Image: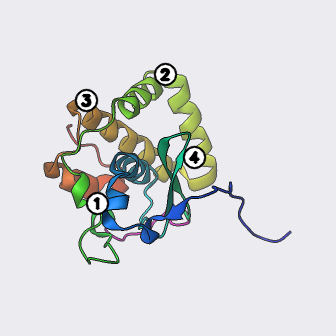
Amino acid sequence: GDEGSFQKFVPEAKAGIELAHDELSAYDEEVLKLWLFDYIIWNTDRHKGNFLAGTNADKRRVHAIDNGLSFGPDTRDYLNIKDEDTGKQYYNRFYDMAIPEQFQERIRAFLSSPERVRRLEKLLDRYVGEAEAEACVSRIRRVAAWAEQGKVGSERMAEMRMAYQGETIDA
C-alpha cells in the first residue's frame, strides 16, 4: 500500500504561526504541556507551524501535528529550536513557568504503575528500539522530578541536553 498519515480534522483551529504573539500567549499553558510531551518523545522539530491552536467547548487546546522527527537519533539540540519570527530560542519562555497540576498528576499516575511503564517500554522497544525506549522512560522520570518541583527551572537545561542518551541525573 501507499504510505501516508492519518490525522483528526480540527475545525476552526489555526497553525501557531498564524496567530499574533498576544493570541498565541493565551495558549502558553497548553504549549508548555506540548513542550514537555515533545521532550518525552524527543521531537526535535516542534515549531509554530507544527501545532494547531483552537478553542473547543470554551477550553483552549493545542494539537500536535508533524511528529516525524520523534524517537530518533536526530542530534539537533532540542533546546535551540528557533522561533521563525524572532530567531530566539522557541521554548525559553517556558522555563520557570508552573507545570499544570493535571499534567503533574498524570505523570505521577503513570509512573506509579510499574505495569504501565513495562508495557510502554515493550511497545517502544518493538517500534523504536531498546535504547530509545529506555531513554524515553528516563525522560518521563525526569519530567516527573521537575513536576515535583512544580516547574522546569532554567538550571535544568544541561539535563535536557543529556536526555537523548538516557543518562541518569539526580533530579
Q: Quadrant of the C terminus?
A: top left
Amino acid carrying label 4: it is Leu
Q: Quadrant of residue 42?
A: bottom left
Q: Which residue is mark 3?
A: 148
Label 4 residue SS: helix
Cα separation between marks 3 and 1 = 20 Å
Amino acid carrying label 1: it is Tyr
Q: Along the line of sight, which residue is nearer the eye, 160 or 64?
A: 64
Cα separation between marks 3 and 4 = 25 Å
Amino acid carrying label 3: it is Glu
Q: At which x and y percent is residue 53? A: 49, 56
Mark nearest the camera among 1 and 2 is: 1
| Residue count near mark 4 (Cα–Cα under 10 Å), binned few <14, some 14–19, many ≥20 | some
Mark nearest the camera among 4 and 1 is: 1
Q: Along the line of sight, which residue is nearer the eye, 163 or 167?
A: 163
Q: Which residue is mark 4?
A: 124
The tag earlier along the polypeptide, 4 or 1, is: 1
Q: Which residue is mark 2?
A: 113
Cα separation between marks 4 and 1 = 26 Å
Q: Is residue 45 visible?
A: no
- Residue 104 image label: none
Give the residues drawn in magenta, as a range: 67-77
